[in-house]
């Protein structure tokens, strides 16, 4: 009992210490900088690099997260000379430093000594060479990772150049699923479900004789065909990431000084650029350990630059820390050949990050690497290290960040629309891929809905099932493909509508419980109390549109994609659109229902782009959120917030290669970049790829 009390009070002390530390960090200036890898340089040019950084008003560098084999070239042999050299030089130059723990790429000697540090996945054991190939739960990996973290922290902790630490790098579970992980999963299942009878019933394991009758016989999940079990294992794997990062944070915080921070550079589902919710990490849970949420955002550029990925990544990252500002730890400078920005685009991108609430813009990376897997992922400087157009444009960004710091730092957003997203629903939805035939996944539903709201200048936040208490902060909530959710979550969403909220559901919402067991009530399950509809059948559309040009956009634009639920409205519910089909035409495609004081809309299919735009515009208007900003639309993007001086700031962006004009409708103010007075109801012109920032008086 004494041991239990001791552990309890230690955990309590750790919790309050963490809260205190999180409260201490106060950012005074916008951070503008680069990842810098002195150890990768073909020759010693540190002094020249710092000279060029100072000319660009770069005020921080991020170092060391890739350097385990350099700081510990042999087991127990340490060399921090390259870190010391950079820390001392940067401090002398007045450039601050973020140090990363070097644990995301393991050294060869560790793999030679303990081959089991390489993760075993469902496809076999990883090979040495690539980064992030290890098992983050492996006892040998953890031992040596802790040792190198402690050795590094003991060495650098008192250096005055350091403003904060990054734990690991773009951490995920890397599909680790070896024998040791399977054993941990069994213990997790014992603790969560208590009995095998409970698991067998909730997961439907009698199917195909998958029933488990002994804990000792609990099979590996790697070959499972049961979506409930696979989804639970994915949830467990995400928890491994949350626990791993919290473990690293706790280590670093033993050495952290007042007014330093700990962060992590989260990333997203990758499709050659940052695309959607990360399947392998629950950002909402993992971010709890961080003082500041960090993010890596990469996106198309040149003629394909829209700003959507910048906005999406920022909105998610801001939301995981309850609306607090965040760091863009990595984004592209030049990047791939197709990403080299047109003149003006680097500025547009940088201010777009600030407009979503970022207080840091960090480029990956300073120089272009001369021999690696990422040789052609170019940094701010090219391989010749000489000033180039991208670097010269960065100079103007750094100067403006410095000049306008007090106006732009700490932007607070007050959005009235939120997306309700769920890693559990994502995993469950993707397990079925619409019934085996379609390749579209959860993010293919989420992103088009997000993109259209972005294009009509509707600002959004993100919520997840662990933040049900925050539902009532929003006038409108969009719920994409909430395939798996508990009764509690669905009742909370019903209650939100009943109390006056406006909700927009997509197809495949409410379909299964939190264990991915399909509900045996009429679909869409519990939420049909609010949606006022039901269905029992669904089909795949072939050349189907909606009937009677319901949204006045022309029959050719009323596309029905991916999936069709054959919906019947309850008495009192309104049908907004029917399917135009000789057989399925009697069924509703979109319904709307008043429930209590609020309104619930249900879309039983995936709309094409133009139809989706019309549907969402209609919903925004019905939620009472259509204002002056919505009179503008892409390529003119508007984002607003309140700065640290308590003044309203309005960013106007032109995501196109031609000049765009608009009427400024807010109060009289000052355009900050040009230092010019602006009166309300004045017509302004944005240059191609241009930006204006107006602070109200």
Image (cartoon, grey):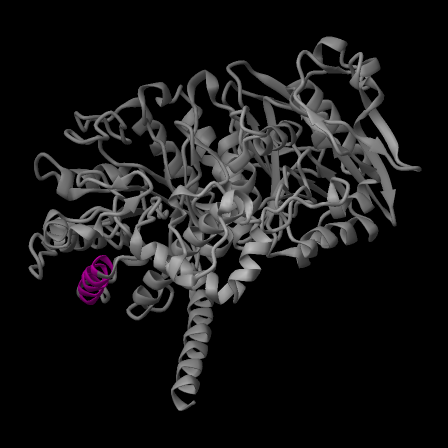
Q: Position of residue 286 (x, y in %)?
A: 45, 55
Q: Residue furthest front?
A: 209
Q: Is residue 171 above or below residue 217?
A: above
Q: Residue at x 9, y 56 (%)?
A: 79
Pick the residue in front: 525 or 164: 525
Compared across the picture, whether 208 is left or right of 58 comes to right
The quadrant the C terminus occupies is: top right
Is residue 375 magenta-colored?
Answer: no
Prevailing SS of the magenta stretch: helix
Quadrant location, the N terminus:
bottom left
Q: Quadrant of residue 17?
A: bottom left
State whether residue 464 is above or below residue 123: below
Q: Residue 322, can we see it? A: no
Q: Which residues are magenta?
A: 140-154
As drawn, 578 above or below 285: above
Q: Residue at x 27, y 41 (%)?
A: 124
Q: Nearer the viewer, residue 191 or 63?
A: 191
Residue 238 visible, this angle: yes
Q: Taking 652 as reference, is 11 left or right? A: left
Indicate the position of residue 241 as horizontal and vertical percent values: 39, 53
Residue at 28% x, 31% y is 380
Residue 240 shown left or right of residue 384 in the figure: right
Q: Position of residue 430 (x, y in %)?
A: 52, 36
Which of 287 and 539 lies nearest the eye of the viewer?
539
Residue 169 position, x and y percent, is 32, 47
Would you identify the image quadrant in which residue 482 lies?
top right
Q: Is residue 150 magenta?
A: yes
Give me the residue at 62% from left, 27% from top. 455
Q: Residue 372, located in which quarter of the rendered image?
A: top left
């Amino acid at each position: 009992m004494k041991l239990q009390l001791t552990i309890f009070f230690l955990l309590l002390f750790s919790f309050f210490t963490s809260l205190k530390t999180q409260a201490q960090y106060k950012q005074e200036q916008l951070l503008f900088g680069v990842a810098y890898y002195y150890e990768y340089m073909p020759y010693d040019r540190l002094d020249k690099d710092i000279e060029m950084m100072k000319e660009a008003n770069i005020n921080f560098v991020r170092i060391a997260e890739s350097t385990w084999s350099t700081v510990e070239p042999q087991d127990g042999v340490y060399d921090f000379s390259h870190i010391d050299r950079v820390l001392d030089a940067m401090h002398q130059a007045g450039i601050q430093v973020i140090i990363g723990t070097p644990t995301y790429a393991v050294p060869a000697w560790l793999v030679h000594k303990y081959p089991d540090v390489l993760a075993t996945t469902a496809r076999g054991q990883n090979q040495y060479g690539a980064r992030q190939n290890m098992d983050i739960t492996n006892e040998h990996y953890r031992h040596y990772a802790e040792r190198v973290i402690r050795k590094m922290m003991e060495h650098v902790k008192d250096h005055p150049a350091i403003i904060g630490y990054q734990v690991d790098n773009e951490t995920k579970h890397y599909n680790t699923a070896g024998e040791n992980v399977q054993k941990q999963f069994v213990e997790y299942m014992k603790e969560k479900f208590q009995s095998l009878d409970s698991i067998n019933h909730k997961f439907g394991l009698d199917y195909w004789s998958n029933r488990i009758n002994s804990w000792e016989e609990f099979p590996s999940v790697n070959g499972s065909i049961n979506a409930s079990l696979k989804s639970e294992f994915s949830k467990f794997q995400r928890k491994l990431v949350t626990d791993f990062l919290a473990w690293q944070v706790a280590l670093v915080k033993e050495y952290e000084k007042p007014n330093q921070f700990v962060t992590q550079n989260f990333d997203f589902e990758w499709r050659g650029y940052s695309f959607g919710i990360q399947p392998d990490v629950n950002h909402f849970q993992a971010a709890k350990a961080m003082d500041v949420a960090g993010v890596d955002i990469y996106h198309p550029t040149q003629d394909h630059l829209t700003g959507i990925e910048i906005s999406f990544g920022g909105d998610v990252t801001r939301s995981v820390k309850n609306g607090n500002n965040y760091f863009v730890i990595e984004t592209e400078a030049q990047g791939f050949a197709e990403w080299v920005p047109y003149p003006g685009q680097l500025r547009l991108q940088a201010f777009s990050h600030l407009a979503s609430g970022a207080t840091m813009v960090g480029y990956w990376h300073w120089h272009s690497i001369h021999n690696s897997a990422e040789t052609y992922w170019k940094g701010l400087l090219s391989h010749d290290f000489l000033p180039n157009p991208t670097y010269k444009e960065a100079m103007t960004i750094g100067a403006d960040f410095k000049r306008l710091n007090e106006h732009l730092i700490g932007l607070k957003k007050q959005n009235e629309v939120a997306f309700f997203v769920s890693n559990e629903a994502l995993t469950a939805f993707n397990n079925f891929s619409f019934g085996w035939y379609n390749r579209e996944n959860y993010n293919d539903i989420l992103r088009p809905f997000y993109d259209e709201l972005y294009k009509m200048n509707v600002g959004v936040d993100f919520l997840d099932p662990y933040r049900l208490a925050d539902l009532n902060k929003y006038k409108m909530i969009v719920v994409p493909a909430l395939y798996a959710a508990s009764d509690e979550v669905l009742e909370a969403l019903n209650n939100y509508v009943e109390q006056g909220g406006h909700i927009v559901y997509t197809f495949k919402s409410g379909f299964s419980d939190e264990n991915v067991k399909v509900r045996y009530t009429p679909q869409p399950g519990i939420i049909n109390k609010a949606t006022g509809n039901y269905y029992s059948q669904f089909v795949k559309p072939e050349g189907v549109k909606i009937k009677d040009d319901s949204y006045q956009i022309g029959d050719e634009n009323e596309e029905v994609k991916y999936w069709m639920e054959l919906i019947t409205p309850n008495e009192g519910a309104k049908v907004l659109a029917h399917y135009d089909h000789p057989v399925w035409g009697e069924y509703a495609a979109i319904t709307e229902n008043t429930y209590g004081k609020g309104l619930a809309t249900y879309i039983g299919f995936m709309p094409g782009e133009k139809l989706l735009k019309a549907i969402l515009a209609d919903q925004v208007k019905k939620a009472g959120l259509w204002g002056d900003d919505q009179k503008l639309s892409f390529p003119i993007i508007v984002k607003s917030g309140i700065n640290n001086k308590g003044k309203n700031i309005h960013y106007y962006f032109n995501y196109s290669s031609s000049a765009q004009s608009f009427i400024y409708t807010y109060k009289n103010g000052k355009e900050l970049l040009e230092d010019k007075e602006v009166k309300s109801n004045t017509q302004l012109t944005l240059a191609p790829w241009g930006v204006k920032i107006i602070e109200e008086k």
